[in-house]
Amino acid sequence: MNNDVGHEIADALGILLRRTTREQLHRQLTEGLGEGLDEVTYPVLSALARTGPRSAADLAPEVGIDRSGVTRRASRLEAAGLVRREPDPDDGRAQLLVLTARGRDAVTELRGRLAAHIARSLSSWPPGEAEAFARQLRRFTTDGPFTGHTG
């Protein structure tokens, strides 16, 4: 395989990973889901769904913002009833952010919206191509350059 494929993939990833691309998608996904859930708070809610209960400090690297940014966003999610704070059993001074039942329901709705959005965008692809792409993308994320494996 030559470097051209690597450049092509890198360029595509650059578009996908742009903050503006993510924020636009998050804005579309959260539209109409109520106060407190928007393109700014979505990453915190989504990260909690992936990782389980975490402190703001532990969640910050997962979300890509600092602890105080996570705390502000979590406060908005808490006010909306999507997140609650619980004492950290391993550190009496810390609190964990935990999804509430409403938060889990919101994540289910968001994941459904995202899956439907992706399916709609791929609906014009020839039969089998979207399925092949999904398998290849999964392989890329499990065996590719971001896993720490070198081959």
Image (cartoon, helix red, strand yellow):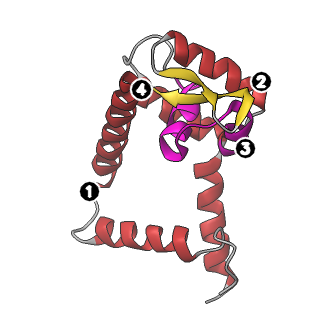
Q: For the residues marked 4 and 2, what is the alpha-carbon distance in whole angstroms? A: 21 Å
Residue 101: % across, % down? 36, 25
The residue shown at (33%, 29%) is 105
Q: Which residues are magenta?
A: 38-62
Label 4 neighbourhood size at 10 Å, few (<14), some (14-19), many (20+)?
Answer: many
Label 3: few (<14), some (14–19) or many (≥20) C-alpha neighbours in 10 Å: few
Residue type, numbered disc 3: Pro
Q: Are marks 1 and 3 in contact (CB under 8 Å)?
A: no
**What numbered label is drawn on residue 68?**
2
The reply to whether residue 7 is visible in this rendering is yes
Please identify, in this view, whether the residue under mark 1 or under mark 4 is nearer the observer.
4
In which image quadrant can residue 47 be found? top right
Find the distance from the CA under tag 2 to the CA under tag 1: 43 Å
Say which mark, if any, is on residue 61.
3
Which amino acid type is shown beneath numbered disc 2?
Ser
Q: Are marks 1 and 4 in contact (CB under 8 Å)?
A: no
Distance of label 3 from label 2 (alpha carbons): 12 Å
Question: Element under label 1?
Answer: loop
Name the magenta segment's main secondary structure: helix
- Assign a secondary structure to mark 4: helix
Q: Which residue is disc 1 drawn over? A: 124
- Label 2 vs 1, first from the N-terminus: 2
Query: Per the image, is 45 magenta?
Result: yes
Viewer-closest of 101 and 91: 91
Report the residue marked by disc 4: 103
